[in-house]
Image: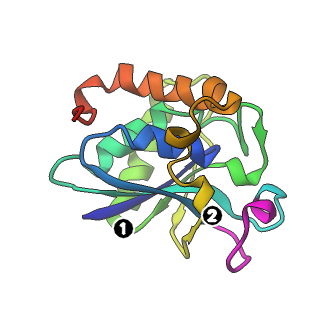
Amino acid sequence: MEKATFGAGCFWCVEAVFQQIEGVQQVVSGYTGGKVKDPTYREVCGGRTGHAEVAQITYDPGVVSFQELLEVFWSSHDPTTLNQQGADVGTQYRSAVFYHNEDQKQLAEHYKAELDASGAFDNPIVTEITPLAVFYVAEDYHQDYFNNNGDQPYCQFVVKPKVEKVKRVFANRLKKAL
């Protein structure tokens, strides 16, 4: 198993999106990229820690590659808005790839450059590509949030459309229903 860590706005969205993908064994919501040790949700949301809300993905590279995870990442949020995804504004919602090794770094940088050059987006990609330092697991109530709180308005209006888009665009890469 390998790990990937992505920030793409609210971690509830990122978690819900990657839980759909075949080969993903686990998705954990958490925080990284800041200066405060053991940050709380309240501290991170206040923008005082420097951390991003992220999802750490444990995946089987024999089933899904890091490059395929990057494709889902780039497609599931707007990587051209600095420190913002929709109504979620602040550095904690920044677009970021926190790489675990040199291969992930090179793949992310290459993919970002190709995407920018392709004109896929009207504006330049501002996604941060930086080494993963310390990953802090978010509080228990943030884990598996969409699956446990899918009727909540934020989930209906923000998370669900992202999940539905991923199901539509990556239909051939989804987990099989049990």
- Badge 1, how many Cα within 10 Å: few under 14, some, many 20+? few
| Residue 43 visible in the displayed image | yes
What secondary structure is marked by label 2? Answer: loop
Quadrant for the C terminus, please.
top left
Q: Position of residue 45 (x, y in %)?
A: 78, 55
- Most extreme residue toward the left is 62
| Residue 113 visible in the displayed image | no
Q: Main secondary structure of the magenta part?
A: loop
Q: Image quarter for residue 26?
A: bottom left
Q: CA distance from mark 2 to mark 1?
A: 30 Å
Q: Earlier in the sequence, mark 2 or mark 1?
A: 1
159 or 49: which is nearer to us? Answer: 159
Task: Name above or below for residue 139 compared with residue 168.
Answer: below
Residue range of the region highlighted in magenta in the rendering: 33-44
Task: Name above or below for residue 170 compared with residue 137.
Answer: above
The residue under label 2 is: 139
Task: Name above or below for residue 137 compared with residue 142.
Answer: below
- Badge 2, how many Cα within 10 Å: few under 14, some, many 20+? few
116 or 80: which is nearer to us? Answer: 80
Q: Position of residue 151 (x, y in %)?
A: 61, 29
Tell me which residue sits at (49%, 24%) in the image: 120
Tell me which residue sits at (15%, 53%) in the image: 62
Tell me which residue sits at (77%, 68%) in the image: 49
2 or 78: which is nearer to us? Answer: 2
Q: Image quarter for residue 58?
A: bottom left
On the picture, is 131 further left or further right than 139? left
Quadrant for the N terminus, please.
bottom left
The amino acid beneath tag 2 is Glu
Task: Name above or below for residue 157 compared with residue 46.
Answer: above
On the picture, is 108 further left or further right than 125? left
The residue under label 1 is: 102
Q: Nearer the viewer, mark 2 or mark 1?
A: 2
